[in-house]
Image: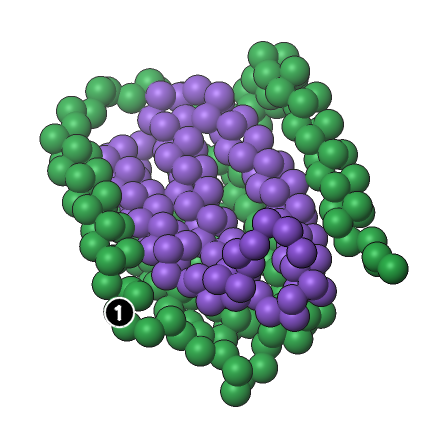
Chain colours: A purple, B green
Amino acid sequence: MIVPLAHVLILAAILFGLGLVCTLVWRSNVIMLLIGIEIMLNAAMLVFVGGSNHWGMADGQVFALIIMAMTSAEVSLALALVVYLHRRKNTVDVDEFRELQD
Amino acid sequence: MYGGYCPDMETYLFYILATVTVIGTILAITEKHPVHAIVYLVTSFFSLASIFFLLSAPLIAMFEVIIYAGAVMVLFMFVIMMLDLGRADEAKRPPLRQWFLPVILGGIILVSIGVLAAGYVTTPHAPGAITVRDFAVTLFRKYGVAVEIISMQLLFAVVGALYLGRRRP
C-alpha cells in the first residue's frame, strides 16, 4: 500500500462532497446534475478500489467494474430522458418539470 | 510495484494526482459553460484513472479511461451539442445564495468522514498485489451471476433509451 487507506477514504469523501454539492446546486441544468451523480459514483469506485488494494482481494475491483457498467446504463437512460424532456419543454431547467401530467 | 520507482515516488504521485483530481472537479462544478465543465471532468477522470493504477488496479484504470473519460463524457458532449446547450451567452451559473446550503451540507459530510477516517486504526494490509488473473477469476467464477445481471441491465437500458428517444407524432 503506497498510502494509508484513510487518505484514500478522505479523497473519496472530498470527491463525494463535491458531487453532492454539484447535484444540489445545479438545478438550472439537468446535465450538470447528472455530472454530479457521475462524480459521486466515481468516489464510490475509489473506495472500492482502495479497499480492494488494502485487503489484497479482487472483489472490490469487480464491484468497481459493475458500478461502471451500471453507470453507463444509467447515463444512457438519463440522457435519453433529457432529450425527451428537452423536446417537450425546450429547456433543461429542473424547475420547469413540475407537473405530472401534460 | 510497477517498474523501478522507489516507494516514495508513488506516494508523492498519489498526492499530486489527488490534488489534480480535486481541483479538476472543483473547476468542473463551478464552470458555467457545460462543454468546459465536461473537459475539466475528463481531466479529473484521467488523474483518477492514474490513482487506480497506483492502487494496483490497472484494468479498472483502463476501463475508467475508455468508458468514463471516453464513452460517457462523449455521450454528455453529444447531448449538449445536439440540444444546443453550449451557447456561451445563455450559460449562467446558479446565484451565490444557492451555493450556500449545499456547500454546508457537503462540508458536514466531509468533516464527519474526515474525523472518522482520522481515527481509523488501519489493519495491516494483506501482502500480494492483485493481478489481472485474480480479477478475472473473481469476476467470472465468484460473481458470474452479477455479470449476467449487469449485461441484462445494459440490454434493458438500450431498449429504454430507444423507447424514450423515438419520435412521437
Q: Amino acid at mark 1?
A: Arg
Foreground: B153 or B102? B102
Return the residue nearer the eye: A66 or B167: B167
Q: Secondary structure at mark 1?
A: helix
In the foreground, B3 or A51:
A51
Q: Is residue A9 above or below residue A25?
A: above
Residue B76 falls left or right of residue B95? right
Q: Nearer the viewer, residue A12 or B53?
A: A12
Q: Which residue is rendered at x = 52% and y = 56% of the image?
A: A98
Relative horizontal placement of residue A101, taking residue B92 as reference (left or right): right
Q: Is residue B66 left or right of residue B58?
A: right
Tell me which residue sits at (62%, 20%) in the image.
B146
Task: Check the image and report above or below for B140 versus B9.
Answer: above
Q: Chain of mark 1?
A: B
Could you tell me which residue is drawn at 37 percent across and 55 percent down? A24
Q: Which residue is mark 1?
A: B97
Q: Is residue B75 visible?
A: no
Residue at the right extreme of this rendering? B169
User: Crowdedness of circle 1 by 10 Å Cα count: few (<14), some, many (20+)?
Assistant: few
Q: Which residue is painted at 45% across and 37% down in the image? A: A45
**Quadrant occupied by the N terminus of chain B:** top left
Q: Position of residue B126 (x, y in %)?
A: 33, 18
Which x, y percent locates residue B86?
59, 76
Residue B112: x percent and y percent?
17, 39
Does any portion of residue B31 appear in the rendered image? yes
B32 up-or-down from B112: above or below: below
State which quarter of the image contains the C terminus of chain B.
bottom right
